Amino acid sequence: MACPPAAHPSPERQPSVKVILASADVQRVVDRIAHQILEKTQGAADTVLLGIPTRGAPLARRLAARISTFEDVDVPVGVLDITLYRDDLRRHATRAVGPTQLPPGGIDGKRVVLVDDVLFSGRTVRAALDALNDVGRPASVQLAVLVDRGHRELPIRADYVGKNIPTALAESVKVTLVETDGADEVRLCGGTR
Amino acid sequence: MIRHLLSGADLDADTATQILDTAAEMATVAGREVKKLPALRGRTVVNLFYEDSTRTRISFEAAAKRLSADVINFSAKGSSVTKGESLKDTALTLQAMGADAVVVRHPASGAPHRLANWVDGSVVNAGDGTHEHPTQALLDAYTMRARLGRLAGLHVAIVGDVLHSRVARSNVLLLSTLGAKVTLVGPPTLIPVDWAARAGVGSVATDADPGTDVCYDLDAVLPGVDVVMMLRVQRERMNDSYFPSAREYARRYGLDGPRMRRLPEHAIVMHPGPMNRGMEITPEVADSPRSTIVEQVANGVSVRMAVLYLLLGGNNR
């Protein structure tokens, strides 16, 4: 669902757009998740961050950078493409396959933290768990998301949540990041507000 | 997205590049502990082979299985074809069995095109007569890109029995789409007359085509190429004497050690296989570090995985 930029106030019949997190908020939230990962993993030893494309990948790199600023530990970062594991492959035209890059040390026996921008139905995370199963055997798997918007369709929950946003199904949550879209922002669009 | 892959000309530059990029991701699966992806679970791929083949059939079978598709192998020997069943009736049988894709090799040029009109599934041409073999061209392009880092601007010499070569035809179409320059080299009897004419070589010079060159002298071409692709001399398709003797052919158009050393430092030697060692290529060249012959086979699986995924992975109907 296309979401018009929030900078232009929309006329009444247009779907409403509300900025949930502005640029400084996104940075604060990332900092907090980095602290929580350090706290919950006792210093992020034996931990690997795997970003789910598109926006989970830069988020994972940011978290690793913040963690190394806070505690001076280098957390390996990778990218896990889940295209070939999606449960809706056949409902759409063929999707392009993205790169999967595991850190040089691999993920066997490590604590893997999956990183994504929005947690919604949980289907992306299910696909990621399947993909993970084929590339190695981590000691444990955790999930970090920037936004949890609810409406889960599978028994999946996040270990680290940047912001809980109660939403209606008709609404959409749009995350933009400097690396992929030029600006950090989280917007809530559509619905009847 | 395309529905069938019948010809090198079916692919525009974007689609071809997408296949090569996807193949690069598929190649990483070969290095994993679990060499399987669930993308084509529940789909059926039929290998319909009316001609002998080892590497192509096994390559397609491995590709389909790595994507979790079910594979049915059909070879004309030992089937109802020996009882006189027509291609169309065989196609309708496969259709009734619910084949999502048919990979077909046939001695008659154009057979896959006919088949594509009879079945609902996707048809992949795995070699039809002396016509085309598009997945071979894709894996050749993939190998060149992997070894040399690019395709645009490369100079590729395709040497030998061009007349009977479906590999050459598909490569010319695909490589020119991707921006490489092709020179066809061989004895005049084994270069298609219309291509020689278009390139302005030979007796019937017409408007020259800048994309594809023709040259009858291998030694003149070697110092300026990035890739030499040697073709097999297809004895089984030759019902005429195209050259005086095997020894004379090997002397003039075979790639041996001294010829290989006249190539530029970075140039690679390719062969689609199976090789006639001592005829078009000597063992010294075939087993040298410049030769990509074994890589081509490995890359074939990745490229065919990419093709099957792009044809069958989504809802492209």
Image (cartoon, helix red, strand yellow):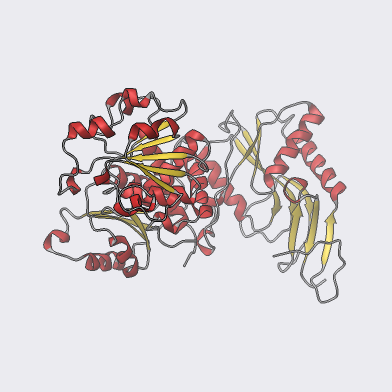
Identify the residue at horizontal 19%, vertical 40% (top origin): B243
Q: Quadrant of residue B9?
A: bottom left
Question: Does the image show residue B66?
Answer: no
Find residue A113 and report its horizontal and vertical position in percent. Answer: 66, 39
**Quadrant showing the N terminus of chain A:** bottom right
Q: Quadrant of residue A123?
A: bottom right
Question: In front here: A144 or B246?
Answer: B246
Total marks shown come to 0
Tell me where residue B106 appears, x and y as whole percent.
Answer: 25, 56
User: Looking at the image, which residue is at 16% across and 35% down?
Assistant: B245
Viewer-side residue, B136 vs A30:
B136
Which is more toward the observer, A98 or B127? B127
Residue shown at 17%/65% (left/top)? B85
Question: Is A98 left, or right, of B226 in this rendering?
Answer: right
Residue B280 placement, left or right of A6: left
Which of the 4 image quarters holds residue A152? bottom right
Q: Quadrant of the C terminus of chain A?
A: bottom right
* Residue B8 locus on image (x, y percent): 41, 54
Residue B155, position in %: x, y?
46, 39
Horizontally, residue B96 falls left or right of residue A7, namely left
| Residue B184 in sight from this viewpoint | yes
- As drawn, B267 above or below A83: above
